[in-house]
Every structure is written in C-alpha cells, then in structure tokens.
C-alpha cells in the first residue's frame, strides 16, 4: 500500500457504479428495470426500440404518469423512490420497483437521456446524463409520459463491457425479457422494434389467451388448457400446453407471483410433479403460471434483481400448482378418477367424404366406428380452438365433457410391424399400441388402487422365483404396498419368493419383470418423489410396462377397443413414462405439405 492509507467514503459516482454491477448485468436487465418503471407509472402503452441487440441503444417510452422536473432530477439519485416510505412498506409491496437504485445505476454506466411530462404541465423536461453526471436539463415539448434512452451501456466500465455477448445473444435476452412483461400485463399494449424492424405489436386490452395467441400464433393453438385453481387462499391461473408440445429447455415456462416474474425451487419441483407420468425427464412443459397469494406470504427481498422469491407456505403452494396443472390437463374435473372411459358405442353407417376425387378400386374398406373426440393438436390450424368454442356453446349446461362430440374413425392397418394407422374425419393418426395400452392399463389399474378395489386373481400354480439380492431388497421394501395393489408375494427364505396372485387387469404379468422394471426406474430416477401415491404410481408404471411387454397379438376388435379406451382416458397423449401414444396429422397439414394449400 502507498502513503494514502486513510479510510474514506467512496464518492457517489463510484458507489453508483458498484451498485450498477448488481442491478445491471446486460442490456436485458436495463430493459427489465425500464419496463417495470413504466408498469409502476400506470402506463397502458409501452414501446421499446433497440439497436445492436441493446448494446448500442435501448429506448423505452410509456404513456404513464410522467414526472415533474424536480422528480425527474430526483429519479436518477440513488435510493430515490416514490414507491416506499419506510421499511415496513417492504412487507407488502405492490409495485415492481422499490429500491430506487435502477435509474441511478443505469445512468452511471451509460449515456442516458430522460424525457418526461405529467398531465399538469404544458411542457416536458429533458435530462441528459453521462457517467452519472447531469449534462443538461431543458424544458422540451413532449407527450404525457416518460421516455428513457440508454446508449452505449458500460462504455465507461471496460470490465463489464467485456462480458457482453454478441448482438444476437443480447437481443435474444432482450426478447425473452420483453415477453415476460408482455405476458404479465396482457392489458398493456406493447411494441418491440429491433434495428428499425417490428418484432412484436401487441394490442392493449388483451385477454391472456389473446396475448398468447398474438405472441405464439398457431404453434400453440389448440394445445393450451386453461388453469383455474384455488386452494388455501392461493390462486393459480394461466395456461398449460398439452404434453406433446414440450420443449427441450425451460425457455417457455413463465411464472409470476403476484404479477412479478419469479423463480423458486418449490415452483420448479411442483411443475415437474404436475407432469409426472406425462413427460420424460429431459422434456420441459410449456406453461404460463400466474400465482396470486397474500403478499405477506412472499418474500421478494431475497435477491437484488428480485427474481428468486421465498414462500412462507411452500407446501400449500406446491399442492396448489400440482392441482392446477393436473386439473387443467385432465379431460374431466375429478382429479382422483383414473378410470378409462366406458360406454363408447359403435356406428357403421358413416362414410368418409371423398376429398380428392381419386378412388382406388379394389381397396378393402374397413368398418367405421365412433369414438369420443380427443382434442387433437394440429399446428397451423385453428380448428381445435373453434371446435371447443362451439362445444361450449352447444353445451347448454348439461354434462358434456371436453371429449365430445363423437367422431368417426377407422383402422387402416399396421405399418412397421407395430404402428397402427387410423383415419378420422380430420386427419390420420399413427398410434403406438404398446404406449397406448400402457396408458389405458395404467389408468384402469390406478383407478382400482386409489379406490381400494383392486381385483386380484389367484394363480392356479403359485410360482417360486429367485431374485438377485438387489431385487429381493426392492420386494421386501415394497411388500405391503405390493400386497395392497393385488400382488400376492411372500418370502420363501433367502432371496426367493412365492407369488400366488397378481392384479387381474394386468393379465399374465410376471412379477420378476415388474421388479426388474422397478429396479431400472430406481437406477435412472435419481430423486424420489414425495407426492401422494407416488409409490403406487411407480409400481403401477413398472407393472403396466411388464404387462404390455407380455402382451399378445391384437386383432381388429382389440385395436378398436384400444382406440376407444385411449380416447376415453384422462391423459391420452402419452404413456405413463412420457412417450407419445399417438401422432396426428391433419388433412389440412397434408394438403399444405403437398402444396395444395398455401
Ligand atoms: P424504483 O423503481 O425502485 O423506485 P428507479 O430508480 O427505477 O427506482 O426509479 C426511481 C423513481 O423514478 C421511481 O420511484 C419513480 O418515481 C420514478 N420513475 C422512474 N421511471 C418512471 C417512469 N417511466 N414514469 C414515471 N416515473 C418514473
Ligand atoms: Mg424501478
């Protein structure tokens, strides 16, 4: 150390720069702070323009309250805020901001220009700041509201500038951030322009569903299910997409707690649990989750950028999220009812309309039968959404579930020695009969298990099996639960067991195979779930997999039965392990692919 060893207070321009390191990480964090201020100012229109991925310039304009000349000058001071007065206010924050740090930090590491005008005055105020120093204050003509431009972010902090990525990467963060607020506030009109090009134009006064369709267009149409759930004073609303549109990362998961974008381990866990038996571990559901709860139960003060939050009643929150997801994805509203649909009927008179004018003469037509409609996901068509709307209109309050109306179907044959090809009036369906069978059997079996009415069938000749020590351990650990689920297994000394009964809905399932599947799942599984009935589900999944493997050759009757059962099941789209059961391609999509439709 040199001679100058006295302790001294850092100058404000230095502390602001240090604070900037916490608040401002990259151009997208500037956008976040500016957009939050617009929301807090009560704007109903926010316009964003960036150049160079936000590295060169970010301009955010709103039509909110605006600021007087004095307030505008105050706003760029550190710890200057209009949003809280003392520390108790932090307990029940309703605004996005409250620290009064953002503008001070941003203006100290950029070339900053603020123009603002309130409804009370004729002219606005323009303040130009560079490196935290006010360069000029002028009275200018301006619309009511505020517009802030941030140019050359980090131009005076080389260490930070180095960490910014390419314009393309920074822009993708900007876009992502913009979408977060576009989803949190569908009622606010928003535009995003990048390098003079319009990226999003979102109208004001949108409903949530409209906003989602404006942003995602056809790619999610027909796939979204609404969530509306409340328990213990926690409300969970929003939309969740059917499992087959899952993504390979979490980029299309948006979670808001009291309108504030939030992440928390308990939420991630609950989402995973909500999709258990519907999605494999490497896939991530698409969902837009709006959680509302008493602000006093949420601690948002954990992190300077306020994204990670803590909850006081995290178990109840977890249950509410799981409940919301499951209820929305199920065809009926009873979440404990696992039983596959009954009472489907057959109808032979329908004939498929001739679409292209070509008839192949000696094709053997197969019979047509009815099955309850499952909502089909068809990218690029809005038929699904319209249909459901119609259904609601004809619903008339009587018991019409989402599975209605009935629709027609016929089995065309089998390809690849496995897949079943079906024609419906809307398109073709490829079905994996193994996966479909697993799903149907799983729901039937779980239905019996949960209602405590497992039908067990005694074996004429009880079987003795010798297990590996590891597998024997699994059996011993699960002996009671296996018994409750209809397996008659008892120890026969050492690692040998006697099996004298199996659940009758599983047919000729081999217990050794079931245990083998359990062992494999445990090996892959990692964390075990603590959710209710998780053990039963695990065993049922292993058992159904084993049962289907032992399964037989299907005849036409059995395939038709399977199609009807699948259509009537709660979660028809995936097997319990998350693999798809059906792939659907609409005639419209086929026409597009053949260039008949543009
Ligand atoms: P905070 O949002 O935590 O209060 P900021 O530094 O982001 O801190 O903003 C400081 C203050 O400037 C705000 O409390 C608000 O009074 C005012 N302000 C900032 N942006 C706007 C805006 N777009 N419209 C109206 N007032 C604004
Ligand atoms: Mg703020």
Image (spheres, grey):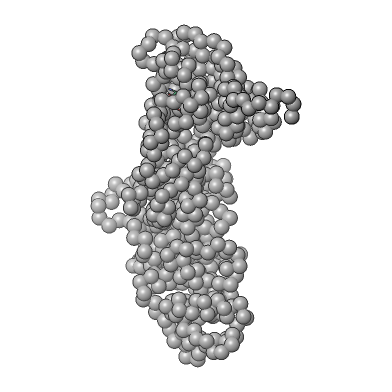
Up the image or down, 370 lies above or below 215; here it is: below
Measured along the vertical axis of the image, is residue 553 above or below residue 373? below
Answer whether residue 69 is visible to the viewer in this image: yes
Q: Residue at image x 35%, y 58%?
A: 332
**567 or 120, which is in the foreground?**
120
| Residue 598 coordinates in the image, percent (x, y) | 53, 38
Which quadrant would residue 10 be assigned to in this image? top right
Q: Nearer the viewer, residue 215 or 584?
A: 215
Q: Name which quarter of the figure residue 121 lies in.
A: top left
Residue at image x 70%, y 24%?
A: 4
Say above or below: 463 vs 223.
Answer: below
Q: How many numbered discs?
A: 0
Work out whether residue 34 can be spotted: no
The spot of residue 119 in percent (x, y) is 36, 15
Q: State whether residue 416 is above or below residue 199.
A: below
Q: Quadrant of the N terminus?
A: top right
Q: Is residue 504 left or right of residue 333?
A: right
Q: Kindly give the residue lying farthest to the left in the view shown.
A: 397
Left or right of residue 21, residue 358 in this image: left
Q: Position of residue 412 (x, y in %)?
A: 51, 63
Please state if 18 lies on the left or on the right of 330 as rendered: right
Q: Residue 372, image x and y in percent?
A: 38, 60
Nearer to us in this view, 266 or 367: 266
Looking at this rendering, what residue extends furthest in the bottom direction? Answer: 461
Q: In this image, 470 relative to 498: left or right?
A: right
Taking the view exactly as shown, the residue that stands out farthest to the right is 2
Residue drawn at x 45%, y 9% as measured from the top left: 141
Q: Residue at x 43, y 84 (%)?
A: 457
């Amino acid at each position: 150390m040199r001679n100058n060893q006295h302790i001294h207070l850092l100058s404000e321009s230095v502390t602001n720069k240090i604070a900037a390191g916490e608040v401002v990480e990259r151009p997208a964090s500037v956008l976040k702070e500016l957009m939050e201020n617009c929301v807090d100012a009560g704007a109903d229109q926010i316009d964003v323009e960036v150049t160079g991925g936000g590295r060169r310039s970010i301009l955010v304009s709103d039509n909110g309250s605006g600021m007087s000349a004095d307030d505008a000058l105050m706003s760029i001071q550190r710890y200057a805020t209009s949003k809280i007065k003392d520390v108790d206010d932090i307990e029940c924050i309703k605004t996005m901001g409250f620290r009064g740090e953002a503008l001070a930090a941003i203006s100290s590491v950029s070339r900053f220009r603020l123009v603002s005008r309130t409804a009370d005055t004729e002219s606005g105020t323009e303040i130009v700041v560079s490196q935290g120093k006010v360069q000029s204050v002028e009275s200018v003509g301006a619309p009511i509201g505020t517009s802030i431009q941030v140019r050359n972010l980090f131009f005076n902090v080389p260490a930070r500038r180095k960490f910014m990525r390419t314009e393309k990467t920074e822009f993708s963060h900007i876009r992502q951030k913009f979408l977060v607020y576009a989803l949190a506030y569908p009622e606010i009109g928003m535009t995003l322009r990048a390098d003079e090009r319009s990226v999003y134009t979102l109208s004001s006064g949108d409903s949530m569903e409209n906003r989602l369709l404006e942003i995602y267009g056809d790619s999610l149409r027909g796939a979204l299910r609404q969530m509306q759930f409340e328990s213990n004073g926690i409300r969970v609303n929003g939309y969740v997409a059917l499992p087959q549109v899952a993504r390979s990362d979490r980029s299309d998961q948006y979670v808001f707690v009291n309108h504030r974008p939030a992440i928390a381990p308990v939420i991630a866990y609950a989402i995973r649990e909500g999709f258990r038996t519907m999605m494999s571990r490497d896939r991530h559901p698409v969902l837009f989750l709006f959680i509302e709860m008493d602000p006093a139960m949420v601690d948002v003060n954990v992190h300077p950028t306020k994204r990670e939050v803590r909850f006081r009643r995290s178990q109840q929150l977890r249950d509410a999220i799981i409940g919301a997801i499951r209820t929305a994805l199920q065809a009926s509203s009873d979440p404990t009812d696992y039983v596959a649909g009954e009472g489907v009927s057959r109808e032979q008179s329908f004939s498929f309309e001739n679409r292209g004018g070509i008839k192949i003469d000696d094709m053997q037509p197969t019979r047509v039968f009815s099955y309850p409609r499952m909502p089909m996901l068809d990218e690029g068509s809005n038929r699904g959404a319209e249909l459901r709307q119609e259904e609601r209109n004809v619903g008339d309050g009587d018991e019409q579930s989402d599975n209605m109306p009935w629709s027609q179907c016929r089995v065309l044959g089998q390809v690849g020695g496995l897949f079943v090809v079906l024609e419906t009036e809307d398109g073709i369906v490829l079905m994996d009969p193994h996966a479909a069978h697993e799903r149907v059997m799983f729901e039937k079996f779980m239905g019996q298990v949960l209602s405590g009415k497992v039908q067990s069938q005694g074996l004429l000749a009880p079987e003795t099996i010798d297990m590996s020590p590891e597998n024997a351990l699994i059996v011993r650990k699960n002996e009671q639960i296996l018994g409750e689920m209809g397996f008659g297994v008892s120890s026969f000394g050492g690692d040998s067991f006697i099996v004298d009964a199996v659940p009758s809905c599983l047919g000729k399932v081999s217990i050794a195979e079931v245990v083998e599947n359990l062992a494999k799942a445990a090996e892959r599984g990692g964390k075990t779930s603590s959710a209710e009935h998780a053990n039963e589900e695990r065993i049922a999944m292993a058992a159904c997999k084993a049962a289907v493997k032992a399964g037989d050759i299907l005849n036409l009757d059995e395939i038709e039965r399977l199609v009807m059962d699948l259509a009537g099941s709660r979660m028809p789209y995936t097997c319990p392990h998350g693999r798809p059961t059906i792939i659907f391609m609409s005639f419209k999509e086929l026409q597009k692919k053949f260039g008949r439709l543009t």
